[in-house]
Image (cartoon, rainbow, N blue to C red):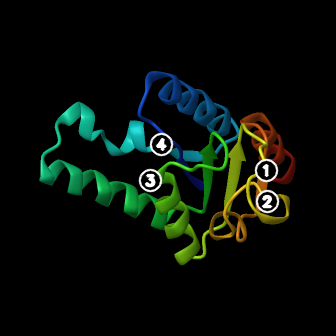
């Protein structure tokens, strides 16, 4: 079973609900999905003690390192800082990654959606999570 790391903003109820629903769609395809808000713990729920923050970081760091590929969700060109770090780790460890963005606004040079440090190594960029799920289903990625 392939392991997927799902990187996305998780700081409000709407985002957290969206992430849960998106991961269920991916899991129904047979993937094992690591969702930080569900599987890594939350500094907001458990307090902001230094030891808790380090433990959560370690879980997430190890999960990116262990994944077969990463899916990064963003609401446009301005990526959540944590998601950007997770993409950076995927690049450093030569993990394939996909970007899903719900905003097609072109803000960078030559019509690019993202800064070149974010999207240059991406396997594919999707406009919706359903497009990503359909791709995974059709390719057995």
Query: Closer to the N terminus: mark 2 or mark 1?
Result: 1
User: Neighbour class for label 1 at 10 Å: few (<14), some, many (≥20)?
Assistant: few
Query: Please, is residue 13 above or below residue 77 in the view?
Result: above
User: Neighbour class for label 3 at 10 Å: few (<14), some, many (≥20)?
Assistant: few
Q: Which mark is residue 112?
A: 2
Q: Secondary structure at mark 3?
A: helix
Kindly tell me whether residue 1 is visible in this rendering. no
Q: CA distance from mark 3 to mark 2?
A: 21 Å
Q: Secondary structure at mark 4?
A: loop
**Residue 123 pos. (x, y %):** 76, 63
Q: Which mark is residue 125?
A: none
Foreground disc of the pair 4, 2: 2
Query: Closer to the N terminus: mark 3 or mark 4?
Result: 4
Q: Are marks 3 and 2 in contact (CB under 8 Å)?
A: no
The quarter of the rendered structure image containing the C terminus is: bottom right
Q: Are marks 2 and 1 in contact (CB under 8 Å)?
A: yes
Please name the residue shown 52% across and 29% down the image.
15
Q: Which mark is residue 82?
A: 3
Query: Please, is residue 67 above or below residue 121 in the view?
Result: above
**Residue 137 pos. (x, y %):** 81, 44
Find residue 104 and report its image quarter: top right
Q: Which mark is residue 106?
A: 1
Query: Closer to the N terminus: mark 4 or mark 2?
Result: 4
Find residue 121 and report its image quarter: bottom right
**Residue 64 relative to residue 78: left or right:** left
Q: CA distance from mark 2 to mark 1?
A: 6 Å
Q: CA distance from mark 3 to mark 1?
A: 22 Å
Tell me how many marks there are. 4
User: Neighbour class for label 4 at 10 Å: few (<14), some, many (≥20)?
Assistant: many
């Amino acid at each position: 079973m392939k392991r997927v790391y799902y990187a996305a903003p998780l700081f409000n109820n709407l985002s957290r609900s969206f992430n849960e629903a998106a991961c269920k769609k991916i899991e129904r395809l047979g993937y094992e999905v690591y969702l930080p808000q569900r599987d890594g713990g939350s500094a907001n729920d458990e307090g902001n003690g230094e030891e808790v923050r380090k433990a959560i970081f370690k879980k997430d760091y190890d999960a990116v390192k262990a994944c077969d590929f990463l899916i990064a969700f963003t609401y446009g060109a301005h990526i959540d800082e944590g998601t950007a770090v997770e993409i950076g780790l995927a690049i450093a460890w030569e993990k394939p990654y996909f970007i899903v963005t719900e905003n097609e606004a072109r803000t960078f040079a030559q019509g690019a959606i993202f800064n070149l440090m974010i999207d240059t190594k991406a396997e594919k960029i999707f406009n919706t999570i359903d497009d990503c799920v359909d791709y995974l289903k059709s390719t057995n990625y």
